[in-house]
Image (tube, helix red, strand yellow):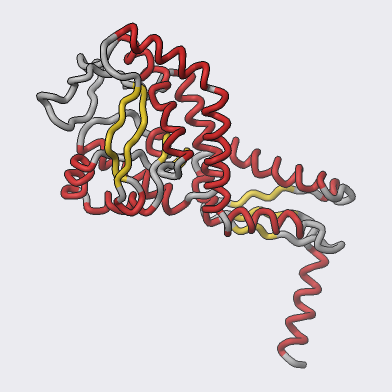
Amino acid sequence: MHKEEKKLITMNSIKKEIDNLVLAWKLYIREWKIKDFLLSLGINLVILFIFGIFLVWLKEAEASISLGKAHFLVWQRYGMKFFLVGMIISWARINYSLFKRVFDFAIAFLGIILSSPLFLIIAIFIKADSSGPVFFRQERVGKDGKTFKIWKFRTMREDAEAQTGPVWAQRDDPRITRIGRLLRKSHLDELPQLINVLKGEMSLIGPRPERPQLNEKIIQNFPQFSQRLKVKPGITGLAQVRYHYGASLKDAAKKLRYDLLYIKRQCWLLDFQIVLWTIGKVLSGEGAH
């Protein structure tokens, strides 16, 4: 008997034994038995599949970082009923960069329109609290080392770095204004960065951009820091939601581990996970500085 015939017989025998949808990840495996739902076709199966992934995320939030290397094994004895689901997942992974840019643009555009009344209110409070411009623009290092001007609501005195030069903001920094302290605690000072996202200079999710002077200083101490420049910087990122605010080289080194992990494992499900973590941080006021 030829090898090909033996292979065919073996595969046919295996096929008869497979009734379940199996989701396999590099670091862990979960099996969702859906035998009782095999008669449900079309959108019902898609919903069930996505719900299964969501349950995995809820139960194994930490481990789901590995989803960037996910492999979906889909086989069912009555035919390829899950073919469409597999196509959707594959497209999202293969076209991740395009998908992310479209998503970034749409959210930034809607966010600016919907938050425009809030922009006006914050601007009035900033002008009433201290002299100086409403917005603060500062040079940052973006993807491939290209610099750009980041937008933020001004939270410090206008001459904040006149004597110190470029330094990280500290907790209870005396240079921060009264309204600035509230903006930082609520993270609303970052809201204008939607403009940077709209222009394509930043993404909603990615490593936080550093100033050229600080970026160079960190790279001198930790050469791997330059790998962060492989992706667009973000308004929020894995390092921001998994590590407290830091203002030292030691903190930069610890956050670097999360940034490199994100670059290696980035995928749409991890992005969704970071968004939820960010919402939790904002609501709790954690991470404010």
Which residue is most to the right?
39
Which residue is most to the left?
163
Residue 73 is left or right of residue 242, and the answer is: right
Q: Is residue 145 above or below residue 199?
A: below
Residue 37 image point, x, y percent: 84, 46
Residue 138 image point, x, y percent: 28, 33
Q: Nearer the viewer, residue 94 or 104?
A: 104
Q: Is residue 266 above or below residue 176?
A: below
Residue 247 image point, x, y percent: 23, 30
At x 46% / y 39%, what residue is drawn?
197
At x 73% / y 81%, what residue is drawn?
7
Residue 210 is left or right of residue 165, and the answer is: right
Q: Is residue 187 above or below residue 35?
A: above
Q: Nearer the viewer, residue 102 or 28?
A: 102
At x 76% / y 62%, what residue is drawn?
75
Which residue is most to the top?
128
Residue 243 image point, x, y percent: 36, 33
